[in-house]
Image (tube, grey):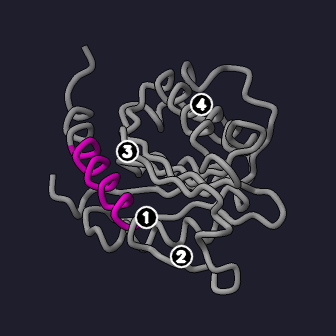
Amino acid sequence: MSSTELRLAVIIASVRDGRFGPNVARWFAAEAQRHGGFTVEVVDLADITLPHALPAVSPLMDPNPERPGTLPQLTRALDDADAVVIVTPEINHSYPASLKTAIDWHFAQWSRKAIGFVGYSGHSGALIAIEHLRAVFSELDAHTVRNYVSFPRYFQLFDMTTRELIDPTGPNEAAATMLDQLHWWASALAAARRLPVA
């Protein structure tokens, strides 16, 4: 499989008023395009219908339940993706409820996919949220890559007028390292998904 065939979905997890996530996602998507290993699609959960009432039968048992509103747009993006990067803040020492809802409406779409994380928050850089997500994606049969990108006190790292990084050197290097890992795993898992399940 050539690198140009690998597809990366970048998910903006926060839907709260005044969120900073789209700015972080815009920076990361540009870095992913610059990396050259993926076709990149950004999906904003603020644009997606996210009903808290889940289907009666788990998506583990029924991978294609009826999904309301714009939720099928997310399903299609996840179906198409070889890799997913979650751009998440940290809320009360975890990740947003909007993201958990989006995750729980799917199962097969995550399975045997490579997952990466970009975190931002006022203190930890969303490291606790990222660790919580690793446990969730393990249950979903996805592989989370070791490296991540983190922005502790993001409001000091981004210019609050231009919404651009003040010094992009370190974050750009971290993104490149994570994207290299993500590309390797996405390539390996894409090949493995073509094999019969034992």
**Mark carried by residue 165:** 2
Report crowding for label 3: few under 14, some 14 to 19, many 20 or more residues within 10 A (C-alpha).
Answer: some
- Tell me the element at label 4: helix
Q: CA distance from mark 2 to mark 1?
A: 9 Å
Q: CA distance from mark 3 to mark 1?
A: 12 Å
Proximity of marks 2 and 1: CB atoms separated by less than 8 Å: yes
Amino acid at dot 3: Asn
Q: Is residue 27 left or right of residue 5?
A: right
Front residue of 77 and 28: 28
Q: Earlier in the sequence, mark 2 or mark 4?
A: 4
Q: Which residue in the protein does label 4 denote?
A: 132
Proximity of marks 2 and 3: CB atoms separated by less than 8 Å: no
Front residue of 63 and 48: 48
- Tag count in the figure? 4
Amino acid at dot 2: Leu
> In the orientation shown, which residue stands out farthest toward the bottom?
162
Q: Earlier in the sequence, mark 1 or mark 4?
A: 4
Residue bounds of the magenta highlight: 172-187
- Tell me the element at label 2: loop
At x 46% / y 54%, what residue is drawn? 149
- Tell me the element at label 1: helix
Q: Which residue in the protein does label 3 denote?
A: 147
Q: Earlier in the sequence, mark 2 or mark 1?
A: 2
Q: Which residue in the protein does label 1 denote?
A: 171
Image spot of residue 2 (x, y percent): 15, 58
Can you say whether 140 is above or below 87 in the image?
above
